[in-house]
């Protein structure tokens, strides 16, 4: 019997909708789209959606996974559960990336994330990793005195890899858009579906890629959406700097832009328009609008619900 656990989203992808009756568990920190309620009802222990009042209650879905380990340990009556070294390093790395190593300025981490970081540091069999990499990574991320990862060095190693400018500049526009893309379907129906791509590159560098406009429009057709949003984030002095691009037909982009700029429900994002009307990129009945986002804490977890509130 097939059982599916949805992690980091709470609605099965539209191209897998035929498997919806197999959804058995949800671990997520995005706004609840209230799908699969017949299989995983609200308030069920198997429906853990850590999102409330436009905010995620944990910075990383991996925090919810580690909490599951703790629950298992408690239910089984085990005094200490030793976590596999490879799994522990993977979970720790994702939590550190998602919370920016609990950077207070970014305000992405929560006490629950910190608790699970501490749990992984104390309950992972780190000795199993020491002496086997042979490529210098061990010396980069481990503190040989404590025989555990050095959090700051491990985070910086992952962050520098994730934000590697040469990596992002080497990608085609299509690859940059699809590497971290999510589709959202409003209750009004699939004809109002839109996509949001997250890119770790300044928006001007993205737009200057060769043939960006044509490849973006082609990707929209491939994804079957009428509106594509691109969320750009770069780190300046350890603080996220965010911009947003909307691409689509003039009426669709115009209405969504007006909603983000003027609706009270979206004011927390602190959106401002970077274009004067005569500077808006137009062509083939398609327009591209650049917006600046003043709230650095507003990731896709907050932007998507704000856009969905329009419908």
Image: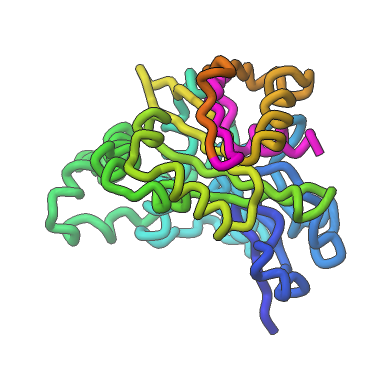
The picture places residue 209, in percent across and down from the top left corner, at: 34, 40
Residue under the image location 85 percent in, 58 percent down: 41
The colour scheme applied to this rendered structure is rainbow
- The relative height of residue 13 versus residue 126 in the rendered view (above or below) is below
Task: Tell me if I can see residue 151 in this picture.
Answer: no
* Name of the residue lying farthest toward the front: 284
Quadrant in the picture for the N terminus: bottom right
- Please name the residue shown 72% across and 42% down the image: 31
Quadrant of the frame with the C terminus: top right
Side of 26 relative to 89 (left or right): right
Membership of 273 in magenta stretch: no
Give me the residue at 57% from left, 56% from top: 221
Q: Residue 65: x, y in percent?
A: 57, 54
In-front residue for pair 122/20: 20
* Residue 184 pos. (x, y %): 68, 49
- In-image side of 200 versus 216 (left or right): left
* Magenta span: 284-311
Whether residue 178 appears in this view of the structure is yes
Q: How many marks?
A: 0
Q: Quadrant of residue 298?
A: top right
The residue shown at (74%, 70%) is: 20
What percent of the width, then of the height, locates residue 297? 56, 25
Which residue is more in the foreground, 25 or 114?
A: 25
């Amino acid at each position: 019997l097939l059982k599916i656990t949805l992690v980091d989203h709470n609605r099965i992808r539209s191209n897998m909708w035929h498997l919806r009756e197999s959804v058995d568990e949800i671990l997520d920190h995005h706004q609840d789209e209230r799908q699969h309620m017949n299989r995983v009802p609200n308030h069920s222990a198997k429906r853990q959606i850590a999102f409330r009042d436009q905010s995620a209650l944990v910075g990383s879905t991996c925090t919810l996974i580690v909490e599951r380990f703790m629950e298992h340990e408690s239910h089984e009556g085990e005094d200490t559960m030793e976590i596999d070294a490879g799994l522990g390093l993977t979970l720790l790395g994702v939590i550190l990336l998602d919370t920016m190593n609990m950077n207070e300025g970014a305000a992405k981490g929560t006490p629950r994330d910190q608790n699970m970081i501490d749990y992984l540091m104390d309950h992972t069999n780190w000795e199993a990793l020491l002496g086997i990499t042979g490529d210098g990574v061990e010396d980069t991320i481990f503190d040989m005195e404590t025989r555990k990862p050095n959090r700051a060095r491990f985070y910086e190693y992952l962050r520098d890899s994730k934000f590697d400018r040469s990596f992002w500049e080497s990608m085609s526009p299509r690859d940059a858009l699809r590497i971290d893309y999510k589709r959202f379907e409003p209750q009004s129906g699939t004809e109002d579906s839109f996509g949001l791509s997250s890119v770790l590159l300044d928006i001007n560098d993205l737009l200057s890629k060769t043939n960006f406009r044509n490849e973006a429009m082609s990707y929209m057709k491939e994804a079957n959406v009428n509106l594509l949003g691109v969320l750009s984030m770069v780190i300046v002095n350890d603080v996220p700097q965010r911009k947003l691009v909307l691409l689509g037909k003039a009426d669709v982009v115009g209405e969504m832009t007006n909603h983000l700029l003027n609706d009270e429900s979206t004011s927390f994002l602190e959106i401002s328009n970077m274009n004067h009307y005569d500077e808006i990129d137009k062509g083939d009945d398609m327009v591209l609008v650049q917006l600046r986002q003043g709230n650095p804490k507003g990731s896709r977890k907050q932007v998507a619900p704000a856009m969905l509130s329009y419908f």
